[in-house]
Every structure is written in C-alpha cells, then in structure tokens.
Amino acid sequence: MTRPQTTQLLEGKKSAAAIREEAAAMVQELRAAGTVPGLALVLATADESAAWYTRAIARAGEKVGIDVRVERLADDASADVVRSALQRLSADDTVHGIILQTPLPPGVDGVEVAIAIAPEKDVDGGNPVSIGRLTAGLPAFAPATAAGVMRILDDHGVELAGRRVVVVGRSLVVGKPAAMLLLARDATVTICHSRTRDLAARTSEAEVLVAAVGRPRMIGAEHVGAGAVVIDVGTTPDEDGNLVGDVDAEAVTGHAGALTPVPGGVGPVTTALLLLNTVTAAARAAG
Ligand code: NAP
C-alpha cells in the first residue's frame, strides 16, 4: 500500500449550488410564462428519516420557487392505494414531478407501484420504464442519486472512458443505474454485491470505486487501490442521527486519490438534481 498521498475531497456543495441556481433561473422563466412547476412527494411511512428527507426536499424546492406538496398516505396503505395516488398525480396538470419515498408499507413492492408514475414526471427515475430507457440509451430521468454520482465525477474532471470502475451495490435506485450511466460513458464497469467473492480483490482493482451499500465504514484501505477515486453513496444514520458513509474515510485518507465526504458529497447533489429534473419536466410540459 502506497502512503502517504494527498486525498482530494470531492465535495458536493458547489455542484449542488450551481444546480439549484440553474433550477431557480428556469423557474423564474416558467413562472413569467404562466407555468408554476409542481412537485409531489408521496410518503407512506412513519419512518423518521424519510420524513426528514421529505421535509428537506420540500424546503429546497420551495426555495427555488417550485410548488411542493406532500401526499401523506397511511403507513399501512395497500399497493392499490399507493398506485391510485400515483395515477391521480400523474394525471394532474399542476404536478410535473412525482417522487415516491421509501420505505413503503409492508407488502408493497416499490418497483411494481412505481409503474404508475408517468415516465415524463418520474423525476427520480423510479419507474422501471425509466431504467429500461436509460439502459437502451433513450432519454429518461435517471435515479437522482446515480445522476448525482455522475455529476460529482464530471464536476471534478474525473475521466471515465476506458477506466476500470467498480460499483458495490446493485439496487435499482443506485447501483444498477449508476453502473448503466458509467457504462454509457465508456467505463469498464464491474458490479459487486453481497454474493461477490473476495470483494477487496475486485474493488482494489478499480480506478473509480462507487460504494452504494448502506453498511457503515465497510470499505477500508484494503478495498481501495492507491490513488483511486472513491464515491461514497452510503448514508446510514448512527445512534445520534448523524449520517455515516460506506467508506472508512479515516482509513482511506492518504491512500485514495479522492473521496466524497458523508455528509456533503453525493447527498446534496442528489437533492438539487431532483429539483432540476422537476423544473425540466415542467419546461417540457409547457412546450
Ligand atoms: P439497498 O437497496 O439495501 O442495496 C444495497 C446493495 O448493497 C445490495 O445490492 C446488496 O447486495 C449490497 N450489499 C449488501 N451487503 C453487501 C456486502 N457485504 N458486500 C457487498 N455488497 C453488499 O440500498 P440502496 O437503496 O442502494 O442504498 C445504498 C446506500 O445508499 C444506503 O446507505 C442509502 O441510504 C444510500 N443512499 C444515499 C442517497 C444519497 O442521496 N446520498 C440516496 C439513496 C440511497 P444484494 O443485492 O446481493 O443484496
């Protein structure tokens, strides 16, 4: 292991501020032309961190001039109830973006119900149609977290074409779409998951490593190649409510070439992109 080297901190705050500014400027134009961008956040859980995240998106949306509404459903709502709320919002001309928050009530399959989100309003890419389109190289909203990973890499000038990239995690909201977006940029992508054998051997070969697991500090120095760019998507609340990443930042500092902080890395970029996607959807609807 080569040490020490300087590990660059890839912060998301500047990118997020630039995205919010872009969204706010578009909102001004749309409002002047008579369109008020609307975002609906659908919440069917009593989960505290989902409620906190929903409030954070709502506040950020209102700040850039989006009309945000929170649709609260019972935390034991059936799949039919969730689906019909999504269908109603999809048919509502004042709503341009729809986000279905997780967790969902027990027994409700997120992918199944997200099919009810109109693809043109699917600003967090939850409808499997959106992922299918992305995979086929067709225009679609990507899940905002995956898009946030790309934005951080781009804003810090990280080359992707031809490079070895490893994504740890294969969820439909982060790992898979991130891998597809990286592949579309000509990276050579490996996806690892809970059944991957000898994870450290796979991840330490990466020039760019994306960790999207949800296991605090599981990625240590042995998982990271010297000089690699490490994107930490993990956000697990600790007992004091502070967010902890998947990467052991202390262990990889001085070894990785660059690392996103948690909090302050992918998270703020993700939230800002949800707003920009909503405004983009409103602009498309306005023609
Ligand atoms: P998820 O649906 O639980 O998926 C976790 C993935 O990690 C799965 O594919 C799982 O593999 C894999 N995994 C679990 N244990 C592993 C191990 N020991 N070794 C290798 N892979 C392992 O989680 P998610 O929704 O993708 O979220 C991942 C993290 O990102 C969470 O901390 C979440 O809070 C965070 N997140 C952050 C943002 C943001 O804006 N920053 C947004 C969304 C999510 P299997 O498929 O084999 O089970």
Image (cartoon, helix red, strand yellow):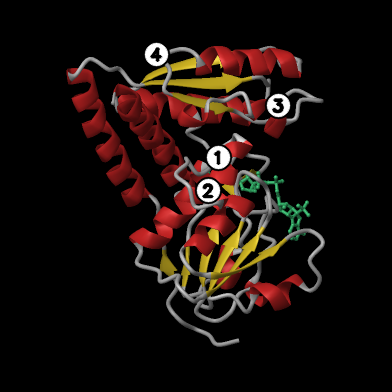
Q: Nearer the viewer, residue 96 or 103?
A: 96
**Three-letter residue code for mark 3:** Leu
Q: Nearer the viewer, residue 74 or 134?
A: 134
**Label 4 or label 3, whichever comes before in sequence order:** 4
Residue under the image location 66 percent in, 69 percent down: 220
- The reply to whether dot 4 and dot 3 touch (C-beta < 8 Å) is no
**Label 2 or label 4, whichever comes before in sequence order:** 4
Q: Which residue is mark 2?
A: 134
**Label 3 or label 2, whichever comes before in sequence order:** 3
- The reply to whether dot 4 and dot 1 touch (C-beta < 8 Å) is no
Q: Which residue is mark 1?
A: 130
Question: Residue 191 location in percent, x, y?
Answer: 67, 63
What is the distance, in whole Å, between disc 2 and disc 4 at their CAs?
A: 26 Å
- Cβ of mark 3 under 8 Å from ligand 1: the answer is no
How busy is the neighbourhood of tag 2: few (under 14 within 10 Å), some, or many (20 plus)? many
143 left or right, relative to 215: left
Quarter of the image holding residue 194? bottom right
Q: Which residue is mark 4?
A: 94
Please determine whether, in this image, residue 133 is positioned above or below residue 167: above
Number of marks present in the image shown: 4
Question: Residue 271 location in percent, x, y?
Answer: 44, 38
Q: Quadrant location of the N terminus?
A: bottom right
What is the distance, in whole Å, between disc 4 and disc 3 at their CAs?
A: 25 Å
- The reply to whether dot 1 and dot 2 touch (C-beta < 8 Å) is yes
Q: Which residue is mark 3?
A: 104
What is the distance, in whole Å, between disc 3 and disc 2 at their CAs?
A: 24 Å
Helix, strand or loop under label 2 = helix
> Which of labels 1 and 3 is toward the front?
1
